[in-house]
Structure formats: C-alpha cells, structure tokens
Amino acid sequence: MSIDKSAMTTDTPSEENGGLKTLDADALALAQMGYTQDLKRNYTWFSLLGVGFSLTNSWWGISAALITGINSGGPVQIIYGLMFFACISTCVGISLSELASALPNAGGQYFWANELAPRKYANFASYLTGWFAWAGSLFTSASVALATSSAGVGCWQLAHPDFVIQPWHVYVGYLVINIFAFIWNCYAKWLPVIAQISLFTSLISFFVILVAVPASAQTHQDAKFVFATFVNGTGWSQNGIAFIVGLINTNYAFACLDCATHLAEEVHRPERQVPIAIMGTVAIGFVTSWFFSIAQFFSMNNLTELQTTPTLVPFLQLLYQALNNTSGAIVLEAMFMATGVWCLVASHTWQSRLCWSFSRDGGLPGSKFLSHVDHRVDVPLRAHFASCFIVLLLGLLYLGSYTAFNSMVTACIVLLYISYSIPVVCLLIKGRDNIKHGPFWLGPVGLFSNIVLLLWTCFTLIMYSFPPVMPVVAGNMNYVSAVYGVVVFIIIIDWFIRGKRGYRGQTLRHEEVEAHITGEEIVG
C-alpha cells in the first residue's frame, strides 16, 4: 500500500504562496492523520447542528415508540425517563465531544480507537468499533423508515376505517421513503441546506403539535396522571423490571449522538464545531421531548384506544382523540412524517459517511470500491448506495417478524453505545492526559462522563436483552441477543478472511505519514 501523494498537494482547501499550493489548517491536520481532503467543507456549525438534531430528533423518537413506554411505566416512565436520559446523554455527549475535539476525523469512534488503543490491539479494537458503529447506523435507518412509513399507512387507515393494514403495505412505504432519502443524499451542496430545513421542520412541527393538541382536547388529565401514574402492562411482576425494559423508548430519543463526528471533514474547524453540534443536540432534544411528552399526556383520554388502534400508530390515535377530527389528526401526523423523512435523510448521510470512512482503511469487504468519492457531486456515492441497499434488505425482516425487527432496533442502540465505549476504554488505558487535548476538554468532568458511559453501556447490554413482556412466547421474545450474534459472527469471519491482513491500522498509517515527511514511500 502506498500513501496518496495528493495528501500534501491537494487542490481542495489551499492557499497560494508564491505559486505553491499548501494545505489550510484543517486539511493539514487531516493529512497528518494520514488522510486526504476528499470531501468539501460545506457545512457550518448551524447546518452541522441541523443534521445532528435531525437524526436524533428526540420528540419525534418519543412519539414513534410511544406505546412501549406507556406499557412499561406509563407517564412516569417517559417523563422521568427523559430527565434521566438527559443526564446520561450529557455524559455520552461530553465523552464524544472531547474525542472529536482532540481527534477530528470522519471515522469518528473507529478512528479514535485506532489511535488510542495499545499498538498490539489497535487494529482489532478499531475494526470492531467500525463494524458496530456501521451496523448501528444501518439498523437506525431501518427503524426510522419503518416508523415514518407506518405513520403514512396509519393515516390512510384512519381516513378509510374498513382498510386492514398488512405488513406489505408498510414495506412498500418503507421502500418509497428510503428511495426519497437516497436521492436527496446524492449531491453534497444540498445537504447543509437540507439539514437546516430539517431542523426548522422539526421545531415547527414540534411547536404546532405542542400547542394544537392540548388546545383542542376536550378533556385533560390531571397532574397526578401525568407525573405520578405508573402503568405496568408488561406482565412482569416487578415494576422495576417493567420500568427498565421500557427505557428503550426514552433511550431511542437520545440515540445516534455520534452523527456530527462523521462530518468532521466537511466542516471548518471541526475541533470546535463538532462538540457544539453534539451538545446542542442533547440540549434541544431534552427540552423538546420533555415538554412535548407532558403536553401529550395531559391531552390523553383513553389509553386502551392507543393500545388497540387499527391504525397501528398510537401517536396518530392520540392526535385523533384530542382533535376529534380525522383531517386535523392527519395534518398533524403529516408534520410528524415530514420530520421523519428528513430524519431519514440525515441517517443516510450518517451511514454513508461511516461506510466510506471505514472503507478508506479497508474495514469493509469491497473497501477499494466503497472508498471512492464521486467528485462531480462530492459524495461517496458507492458507499451511499451500498448502505441504502442493505437498509432496503433489512426491511424484509419486518415482513417475517415484527418482533425480530424491533429487536434489531434495540440492537442499534446498544451497538452504538459499545462503539462509543471502546475508544473511551482505550483513552482511559492510555491516560486522559497522555493525548493532545482539543479546545473542548473538561478534565475531571470528562473523566466522570467516561465512567458513566461505560457503566451505562454494560447496563444496556444486559438489561435490554430482557423480554419486553411476560410470559415469553415466540411472538414476543426479545431476539436482540441473536442480532448481536449475527453481527459478531460476520465481523469475526471477515476479520480472519480479509480484515486481519488488509486493514490499514495504526502502525501502517503512522508509517505512511512519517514517510511523507521524510520523502520516502511505503510499499506493501
């Protein structure tokens, strides 16, 4: 393998100096990591925040999985669960922001693991992290597409009460929405504008629904129902277990915080801008989701209808209860759908950048093909197409088993936490003060946040594997352990067949950078 000589002579951001082209500070820092500036830096801090929040979209996530939380603790579970997860996610955000500030790279957590792990274990730690992160992004895209498609099919059922929803109806919508999101990701100059549109769409939709639903509801619940009612519809005899298995709903509302880190090579001064996007996402996410949930619970009047609605969309039924008007409910649900579509666009951006950056280092089968950037549109189109195609295939799981599909959604959250935790473990082993700190570095607060992240990852790995309801039968079993098994099996097989000898890890990359400095060339 030989390092690309254009890394030091690229025409992308450069300055003229007596006829010589030199890299700007951002591209130079990237070259010192061993990478070329392949993508244009089109994002600003605001558009980066837009894409980060568009993907996480906490109030939307709560709405999409509303009934799970209600059955596993009721309003108490969601209201206080959101407060709990705001704290957990702040620690996760701080951990990610410190690393993104110190080592800004589109590879995100897999790159950090590669840099921070002991040399003997660096390649495998990085390889494992990259696979977990990419798998988590694919599963997330599948869940967003399904929730958005289900909302659309549910609206049709609400307007046509005799219509009986079949799984293939939802899958057709799933395909259409994914293709739409794929198209919007095919041209880089669109994406920062789309990110801002998505942010405003989400916030406007949030505000309209927040005001319209309580204002239109003919009856309202009292404060005791909203803040002190615990519902255990899981079949678990222990309320504590019921509460824990329902945490997946509120956890989903704060997932995917690493999104902005994978756009570090598309924004200037990423060491400052990426942490702003991450921490801003957590802050906006908590404020919107918490007040949104309170407003919806005050407006709820029949829990049984939400659980048994023929639309299969509890949130749509809640809107209909409050407005008592089919057209009004569909209009508000359409705003929810629009937010979901833009959320999927952001998710496709995220998964494609992960696929592309990981492939630059030989992390995936077909890496040479997947690491190509089409400079006509400044997008890694091959990685984008491959990721989206896999998401389309994952949707077929819904046709076979809705329960298995839900297990995949659970897996996406835990796999992402593991991908965050591996570089943090490497950081603590190396020593937090033994790396060059970025502008965002919180010292003891950062250490505390690292510990919280690691403990929470262990907790989710165990507790999110519990069955969501009792008694357990094939139709309600939690198959998340099987999902982990499949992912790990694929990783191990690929590692020994291809990755172990073909992965461009810490040692080789550092040798290539050193060779550039000394004017030599590494061949191998």
Image: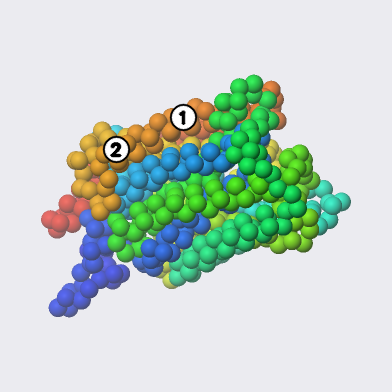
Q: Nearer the viewer, residue 118 or 88?
A: 88
Q: Colour scheme in the image?
A: rainbow
- The residue tagged with tag 1: helix, strand or loop? helix
Residue type at mark 1 is Phe
Residue 344 vertical position relative to residue 298 in the rendered view, above or below = below
Question: What percent of the width, then of the height, locates residue 448?
Answer: 32, 36
Question: What percent of the width, then of the height, locates residue 242?
Answer: 60, 28
Earlier-in-chain disc, 2 versus 1 = 2
User: Does residue 423 appear in the picture of this structure?
Assistant: yes
Residue lying at 17% horizontally and 53% vertically, measured from the top left = 515
Residue 114 vertical position relative to residue 208 in the rendered view, above or below = above
Residue lying at 60% horizontally and 47% vertically, measured from the top left = 294
The nearer-to-camera label among 2 and 1 is 2
Relative horizontal placement of residue 120, taking residue 264 as reference (left or right): left
Question: What percent of the width, then of the height, locates residue 405?
Answer: 63, 40
Relative horizontal placement of residue 468, taking residue 170 as reference (left or right): left
In the picture, the disc for residue 447 is 2
Work out how far the residue at label 2 is from the one at label 1, CA to CA, in angstroms. Answer: 19 Å
The answer to whether the residue labelled 2 contacts the one labelled 1, judged by CB atoms less than 8 Å apart, is no
In the picture, the disc for residue 87 is none
| Residue at the outermost bottom position | 19
Q: Nearer the viewer, residue 245 or 27?
A: 245
Q: Residues within 10 Å of mark 2 (few under 14, many from 20)?
A: some
Residue type at mark 2 is Leu
Image-quadrant location for residue 21: bottom left
User: Does residue 396 appear in the picture of this structure?
Assistant: no
**Residue bearing mark 1:** 459
Residue lying at 45% horizontally and 70% vertically, measured from the top left = 189
